[in-house]
Amino acid sequence: MKFEPTRWSLIVAAGQRGGRDGPGALEELCKVYWAPIYAFIRRKGYSTEAAEDLTQGFLTSLIERNSLSSADPVRGKFRTFLLACVQNYLAKELRRENTEKRGGKVIFTPLRGLDQIERLAIQAAHDRTPEQSFERQWALTVLAQSLKRLEENWKKKGKAEEFEALKPVLTGELGKVPYGELAERLKRTPNAVKILVHRLRTNFGQVLREEIAQTLTENEDTDAELRYLLEVLQK
């Protein structure tokens, strides 16, 4: 059986300079956590262009300075570790008289993968502190990653059509579930659709908890972190 790498296993691999899995692991982490980092820097008062450059610079610095080698699952949440790294990076950049463009040997532009609406949402959060913006975007990233994993799981089981039809139930695009319409679309009975919806929600809850657990230590409470992230989304 092939086990998917956890967030911490990716982090450890990314921090191992010269390791076979390092470059791929680092690229994966950068894709996943670009948005929270960008949201934090943007809310620090930087322009869109400056925030993009600083986000690129920070991610590149993780490679150049081998910063992830100091990441240790025993020390706690990766969310806390990453935020501290970003804060330290910005403090150092502020002390630099001539900030040079980053990039160098690394070509990575994950911002193109962000939806325009998502970028606008990040920039429009004027009532949040940089830390609150980071944590909210982190929570959204966790949800997005969980939804992506759930979709992949259902597709592997040959249930892509069912997932596509029922996904709005999870994303909030549907208010009251139109079981009749879904039943007609899926050629199922309304009761069968209700069972599918229940199963989808249950699966999503399981995947979400697994996704959260990947960024925690064994001694940290997954349910407590889940409650915290849900509270963050409600603010």
Image (spheres, grey):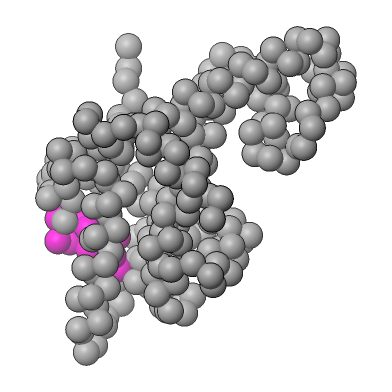
* Image location (x, y in percent) of residue 9: 23, 34
Closer to the camera in the image, 51 or 140: 140
Quadrant of the image containing the N terminus: top left
Taking the image as drawn, is residue 77 in sight?
Answer: yes
Closer-to-camera residue (107/117): 117
Q: Residue at x 24, y 60 (%)?
A: 84
Q: How many numbered marks, from 0 up?
A: 0
Picture layout, residue 107 above or below residue 94? above
Q: Which residues are magenta?
A: 57-66
Q: Is residue 60 magenta?
A: yes
Horizontal side of residue 128 vs 175, given as left or right? left
- The overriding secondary structure of the stretch rendered in magenta is helix
Left-right relation of 141 to 18: right
Task: From the top left corner, tell me how far across and down residue 219 is, in percent.
Answer: 21, 30
Residue at (65, 39) in percent of width and height = 171
Q: Position of residue 215 (x, y in %)?
A: 30, 38
Residue 235, image x, y percentages: 54, 55
* Residue at 45% across, 44% down: 229
Choose top left, top right, bottom left or bottom right for residue 120. Answer: bottom right
Q: Answer whether residue 102 is magenta in the image.
A: no
Q: Is residue 36 left or right of residue 17?
A: right
Question: Between residues 209 and 101, which one lies in front from this camera angle?
Answer: 209
Question: Is residue 185 in view?
Answer: no
Q: Which residue shows up at 21% across the image and 57% down it?
A: 63
Looking at the picture, does residue 186 appear above or below residue 135?
A: above
Q: Quadrant of residue 132?
A: bottom left
